[in-house]
Amino acid sequence: MSSSAVDARLGLLTYKNDHESHISIKNQDVCANQCKDKPCVALCPAAVYTWDDVKKNTKVQYENCIECGGCRMICPYLNIDCHWPRGGFGVAYKYG
Ligand code: SF4
Ligand code: SF4
């Protein structure tokens, strides 16, 4: 699927912000010192993760998350703590 198609699909989503991240990085030192390729940045379909090369840490834009479940697979160091937002919060899918 092209990135524009993904963007179009993401445009069909709304997000009710819990103001509390449901995603966190367990240990930023692992990102900085052990994870060379940083696959979370490339593989998350919603661009939740970005690498800050100045601060040497992984930033998490949790509001972007479409709750696809990919976090369980994309980090080779199991360094992402991701749980679903509280009921009523998080992403909502619109149909039609
Ligand atoms: S894949 Fe995991 S260890 Fe690597 S940068 Fe992302 S969160 Fe950190
Ligand atoms: S659940 Fe999916 S969209 Fe959300 S952060 Fe993980 S990979 Fe990205």
Image (cartoon, rainbow, N blue to C red):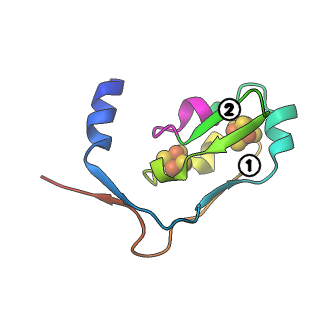
Q: Residue 51's mark?
A: 2
- Image quadrant holding the N terminus, namely top left
Measured as percent of width and height from the top left, residue 51 is found at 68, 32
Q: Which residue is mark 1?
A: 78
The foreground one among 70 and 65 is 65
Q: Is mark 2 within 8 Å of ligand 1?
A: yes
Residue 55 vertical placement versus 91 (above, below): above
- Determine the residue positioned at 60% across, 33% down: 41
In magenta, the rendered stretch is: 40-47
Do we see residue 1 in this rendering?
no
Taking the image as shown, residue 84 lies to the left or right of residue 58, namely left
Outermost bottom residue: 87
- Determine the residue positioned at 62% across, 40% down: 74
- Badge 1 crowding class, 10 Å Cα cut-off, few under 14, some 14 to 19, many 20 or more, is few
Taking the image as shown, residue 71 lies to the left or right of residue 17, namely right
- Determine the residue positioned at 54% across, 52% down: 62
Q: Which kind of residue does numbered mark 2 sit on? A: Trp
Measured as percent of width and height from the top left, residue 82 is found at 61, 58
Measured as percent of width and height from the top left, residue 42 is found at 57, 29
Measured as percent of width and height from the top left, residue 91 is found at 38, 59
Residue 95 quadrant: bottom left
Q: Secondary structure at mark 1?
A: loop
Q: Is mark 1 within 8 Å of ligand 1?
A: yes
- Badge 2 crowding class, 10 Å Cα cut-off, few under 14, some 14 to 19, many 20 or more, is some
Q: Residue 10's mark?
A: none
Disc 2 versus disc 1: distance between alpha carbons? 17 Å
Residue 27 vertical placement versus 76 (above, below): below
